[in-house]
């Protein structure tokens, strides 16, 4: 597998030199902050690519080209934004960048409720707690229809938790939920967040899936023409938040997406952390079932708790990481045997704990240097062991 590392551009406190020190050769990045209403310009793409290459690295994956809300809504402006998306795909291909990760989550991107969850080791991890979400939704946001989205047990616990929160804790929770985490497409204030939720309030999961497939029917042929691969990222977490539909959370969801548009250019970002939140998901089975479509892998582990999960060490938690890596290595061998030029699957250590000297430093939540360095080293060790002579994944 191609060892990669997410980099948030020149403003990232983790430098490209650090990426090289970590032993990664691929960089996963995007034109962060770009106006999503316009295509990515070839000149901007080439300049970012040059910066990466001058550091001795390669731009291996785009994460992500944001999908405009109009496309998710399927409104009158969707066609224009799909055309812009196709233009970006072609411009990226013109300078040799062909793997594009994207997601189709409305309003919110990946979401956590606690950015400073202390582990027994003293390290700091990210955590999501449904009770915290419900506390904010029911008693701060006071969203219409929120009461029907939670079971009685969660509502009782949420009310108790909210009543014991300080004003500062309430504001911290709100900022964590709606202000936008690294790589998120949007950052919201409360009023804007309410407006965006209202825009999607009449959209069902079936409606959103129709709009996703309409998008793919247009962009996948364009990707095929230029030899590019799109890889959808699963919803994180893989269930509805604030009443918003989510449609990329399990094997059945993926089967509908790939069955509707069978092209290999319509692919998957295998995020073990996102899919691993649901104990109903058999990740190893999913990796084998959709192996030919996995163009990128986020390798991250989670530990499930009651109505919650936290991000554990990469080789700890509820995800059988060794089995996932074995499945990906097996897929790479199959691609080599069949003559696929894109046989190598880029992977990155997805998220990492705050450890050692990263305490007190400026870090993007989940993207500290040392935590990811540890994660990459662990994953690299598993890959190396499975590639030893006589070892069969």
Image (spheres, rainbow, N blue to C red):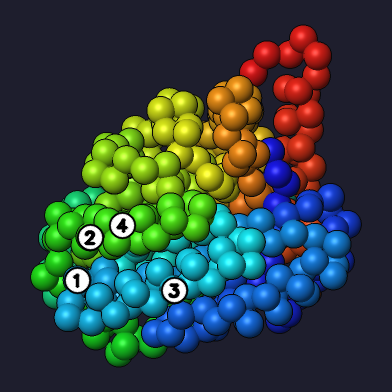
Task: Specify whether residue 135 is in view.
Answer: no
What percent of the width, then of the height, locates residue 352? Answer: 67, 54
- Counting residues from the start of the chain, the first of labels 2 and 1 encountered is 1
Q: Residue furthest top?
A: 390
Q: Are marks 4 and 1 in contact (CB under 8 Å)?
A: no
At 43% from the left and 84% from the top, the residue drawn is 38
Q: Which residue is mark 4?
A: 216
Please tell me which residue lies in front, 160 or 150: 150
Could you give the CA–CA distance between mark 3 and mark 2, rounded to whole angstroms?
A: 17 Å
Q: Earlier in the sequence, mark 1 or mark 3?
A: 1
Of circles 3 and 2, the one toward us is 3
Label 4 vs 1, first from the N-terminus: 1
Badge nearest the viewer, 3 or 4? 3
> Which disc, if any, is residue 87?
3
Q: Are marks 2 and 1 in contact (CB under 8 Å)?
A: yes
Disc nearer the start of the sequence (3/2): 3
Q: Quadrant of the C terminus?
A: top right
Q: x%, y% of residue 229?
A: 49, 52
Q: Picture coordinates of residue 388 (x, y %)?
A: 80, 19
Examine the image and state in which quarter residue 160 appears.
bottom left
Which dot marks residue 74? Answer: 1
What residue did someone put label 2 on?
A: 214
How many angstroms separate mark 2 from mark 1 (CA)? Answer: 9 Å
């Amino acid at each position: 597998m191609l060892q990669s590392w997410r980099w948030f551009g020149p403003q990232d406190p983790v430098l490209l030199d650090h990426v090289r020190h970590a032993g990664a050769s691929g960089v996963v990045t995007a034109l962060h902050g770009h106006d999503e209403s316009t295509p990515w310009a070839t000149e901007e793409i080439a300049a970012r690519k040059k910066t990466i290459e001058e550091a001795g690295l390669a731009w291996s994956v785009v994460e992500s080209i944001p999908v405009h809300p109009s496309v998710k809504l399927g409104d009158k402006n969707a066609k224009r934004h799909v055309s812009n998306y196709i233009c970006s795909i072609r411009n990226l291909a013109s300078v040799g960048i062909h793997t594009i990760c994207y997601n189709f989550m409305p309003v919110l991107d990946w979401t956590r409720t606690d950015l400073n969850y202390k582990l027994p080791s003293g390290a700091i991890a990210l955590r999501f707690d449904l009770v915290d979400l419900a506390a904010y939704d029911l008693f701060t946001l006071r969203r219409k229809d929120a009461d029907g989205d939670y079971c009685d047990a969660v509502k009782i616990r949420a009310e108790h938790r909210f009543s014991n929160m300080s004003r500062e804790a309430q504001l911290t929770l709100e900022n964590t939920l709606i202000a936008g985490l690294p790589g998120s497409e949007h950052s919201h204030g409360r009023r804007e967040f309410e407006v965006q939720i209202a825009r999607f309030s009449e959209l069902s999961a079936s409606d959103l899936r129709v709009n996703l497939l309409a998008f793919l029917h247009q962009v996948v042929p364009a990707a095929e023409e230029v030899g590019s691969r799109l890889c959808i990222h699963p919803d994180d977490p893989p269930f509805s938040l604030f009443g918003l539909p989510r449609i990329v959370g399990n094997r059945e969801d993926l089967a509908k997406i790939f069955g509707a548009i069978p092209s290999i250019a319509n692919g998957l970002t295998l995020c073990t952390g996102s899919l691993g939140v649901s104990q109903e998901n058999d990740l190893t089975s999913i990796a084998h079932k959709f192996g030919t479509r996995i163009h990128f892998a986020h390798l991250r582990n989670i530990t499930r708790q009651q109505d919650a999960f936290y991000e554990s060490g990469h080789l700890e938690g509820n995800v059988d990481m060794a089995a996932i890596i074995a499945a990906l290595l097996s897929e790479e061998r199959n691609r080599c045997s069949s003559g696929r030029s894109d046989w190598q699957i880029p992977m990155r250590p997805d998220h990492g704990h705050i450890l050692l000297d990263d305490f007190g430093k400026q870090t993007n939540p989940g993207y500290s240097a040392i935590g990811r360095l540890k994660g990459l080293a662990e994953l690299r060790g598993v890959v190396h062991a499975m590639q030893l002579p006589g070892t069969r994944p």
